[in-house]
Amino acid sequence: MIHVIATIQLAPGTREAFLDEFLRLTPLVRAESGCIEYGATVDEPTSHHAQELVGENAVVVVEKWADVSALTAHLQAPHMADYRVRVKNFIQGVKLRVLRPV
């Protein structure tokens, strides 16, 4: 199993429109072979001093995949290509972390 943390920086004021598109995509991704978990998250401010907020113009996608080949197939899926076209004007940058449990 692998974990994927994708931090998506958005153009100011576009987060709700981006999330509308992301939530349309989510059931398709969750139905993919090898998808264990897939969902968008946003900041939940707390009083914890070590917490680092991503801000109101960002979304963090938390994913779990059976293996790297499942992630690769996901990235090449036709619905992902369609999604990228629909959100391209919202996204200013993406940081991707692919991790394995120890």
Image: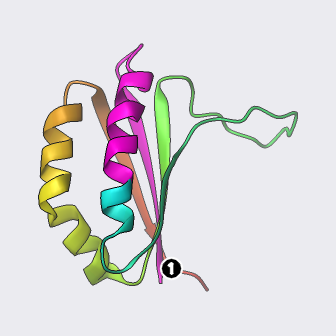
- Residue at screen point 34% across, 69% down: 31
Viewer-proximal residue, 17 or 72?
A: 17
The quarter of the picture where residue 11 lies is top left
Find residue 26 and report its horizontal and vertical position in percent: 38, 53
Q: Which residues are magenta?
A: 1-26
Q: Is residue 78 above or below residue 90?
A: below
Find residue 12 and report its horizontal and vertical position in percent: 40, 15
- Which residue is labeled 1 in the image? 100
Residue 4 magenta: yes
Mark 1 surroundings: few (<14), some (14-19) or many (≥20) residues within 10 A = few
The quarter of the picture where residue 78 lies is bottom left
Q: Secondary structure at mark 1?
A: loop
Q: Could you tell whether 72 is left or right of 56 in the image?
A: left
- Residue at screen point 38% across, 32% down: 20
Viewer-proximal residue, 62 or 93?
A: 62
Viewer-proximal residue, 49 or 41?
A: 41
Find residue 14 and report its horizontal and vertical position in percent: 37, 19
- Residue at screen point 29% across, 29% down: 92
The quarter of the picture where residue 75 lies is bottom left
Q: Is residue 5 above or below residue 74?
A: above
Which quadrant is home to the C terminus? Answer: bottom right
- Name which residue type carries label 1: Arg
- Residue at screen point 33% across, 62% down: 29
Find residue 95 and report its horizontal and vertical position in percent: 38, 48
